[in-house]
Amino acid sequence: MIDKSWVAFLLNNATESVTKMLKNTAVTLLSIPLKPFSYFLAALKPIRNSPTTINDRNYSGHALDRMQDRGIFPSVVENTIQNGVRIEGKNGRTNLYYDANNNISVIVRKDNERVVTTSFGFIGQ
């Protein structure tokens, strides 16, 4: 026969443990910085532009979309690539170019020198 006091003890301790775990999880989840909803909507947008070449520089359709959305001109992208600081991307297939004067980041694929994306600020890789 099972001792009822032992079962009550186990249930009480299990409830306390689960409650503590949930509280810790909630604190952890609340401390994660959330992206604005528009960030996720941007990921759902179809690519509007086709890949193209501007002044002997290849651009992906995504890069052209981001440039249009952010008002970044091809001349600024080219200046960033020519004069910015180059950092190897984390996956080894890209280079990040950062121009602190214009606060612009440009990511370029190594294999075909195509501009993948552009953004204001430093894109951490």
Image: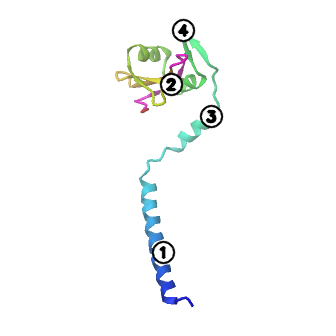
Give the residue pinned by disc 1.
14
Give the residue pinned by disc 3.
45
> Disc 1 or 2, which lies upstream in sequence?
1
Magenta region, residue range: 110-123
> Disc 3 or 4, which lies upstream in sequence?
3
In the image, residue 25 sits, relative to residue 19, either above or below, namely: above
Are discs 2 and 3 less than 8 Å apart at CB?
A: no
Count neighbours of disc 3 (C-alpha within 10 A) and say few if under 14, some if 14 to 19, many if 20 or more.
few
The three-letter code of the residue at mark 3 reads Lys
Q: Residue at x 65, y 31 (%)?
A: 46
Give the percent coordinates (x, y) of residue 86. 39, 21
> Disc 1 or 4, which lies upstream in sequence?
1
Distance (Cα) linking label 1 and label 2: 49 Å
> Disc 4 or 2, which lies upstream in sequence?
4
Q: Tell us which disc is closer to us: 3 or 4.
A: 4
Q: Residue reaching furthest top? A: 56
For residue 56, the mark is 4
Q: Quadrant of the C terminus?
A: top left
Give the residue pinned by disc 2.
93
Q: Does dot 3 land on a helix, a strand or a loop?
A: loop
Distance (Cα) linking label 3 and label 4: 27 Å
Q: Tell us which disc is closer to us: 4 or 2.
A: 2
Would residue 113 be counted in the magenta stretch? yes
